[in-house]
Amino acid sequence: MTEATAFSLRNVGAGPDPFSLVDVDADFAVVCFQRDYHCTNCRKQVQALADQYDAFRERGAEVLSIVPEPPERLREWQEQYDLPYPLLADPEATVGDAYDQPVRFGFLGGLSDFLGRMPAVVVLDLRGEEPDVVYEQRGSSTFDRPDIEDLLAALDEARTG
């Protein structure tokens, strides 16, 4: 695995802890990079993913949500939302950085994830020897994230293409 895909993060959601891509029991991984614990749109997205989780599983995909926060903080999300998929803590944002999660405002954005880190989604095809990116969207604002329908369509295309 490449440096970006060979991560191991603490998991406070469903699945093993710690969690890495080798733990994914699916053909695809839908990796959602969140901004931070306080982000209202991130909270809405993790809930929307949970609401449509069965649709992802029907397409042979596992959803992963990665948040640049410590596990203790993410446990509050898990307790509140009871997410059926892995909720991964990336407190140093090393995996987010490895996947080029956007950070606005250059140096100033790097000082605070609250100001700078933007959402991103990467869909990985795990059927080959190495994970292959088949879809990606890197947000330019906290609102700039794909609809669930777009992610499901990307999975449909990857499965048949």
Image (cartoon, rainbow, N blue to C red):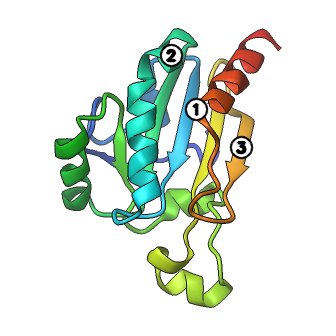
**Which residue is outermost to the bottom?**
108
Q: Which mark is residue 148?
A: 1
Q: Nearer the viewer, residue 117 or 81?
A: 81
| Label 1 Cα neighbours within 10 Å, binned few <14 / some 14-19 / many ≥20 | some
Q: Nearer the viewer, residue 27 or 5?
A: 27
Q: Nearer the viewer, mark 3 or mark 1?
A: 1
- Callout 3 amino acid: Glu
Residue 108 visible? The answer is yes
Q: CA distance from mark 3 to mark 1?
A: 13 Å
Sequence order check, earlier mark of 3 and 1: 3
Q: Secondary structure at mark 1?
A: helix
Of mark 2 and mark 3, the one earlier in the sequence is 2
Check disc 3 and report its element: helix, strand or loop. Answer: strand
Q: Residues within 10 Å of mark 3 (few under 14, many from 20)?
A: some
The spot of residue 47 in percent (x, y) is 38, 39
Please identify the quadrant where the N terminus is shown: top right
* Residue carrying label 2: 55
Mark nearer the N terminus (1 vs 2)? 2
Residue 136 bears which disc, if any? 3
Query: Number of callouts in the render?
Result: 3
The three-letter amino acid code for the residue at tag 2 is Ala
Crowd around label 2: few <14 · some 14–19 · many ≥20 (10 Å): some
- For marks 1 and 2, give the CA distance: 10 Å
**Which quadrant of the view contains residue 117?**
bottom right
Q: Nearer the viewer, residue 7 or 89?
A: 89
Left or right of 147, for residue 9: left
Residue 19 pos. (x, y %): 36, 39
Q: CA distance from mark 2 to mark 3?
A: 19 Å
Residue 43 pos. (x, y %) = 38, 51
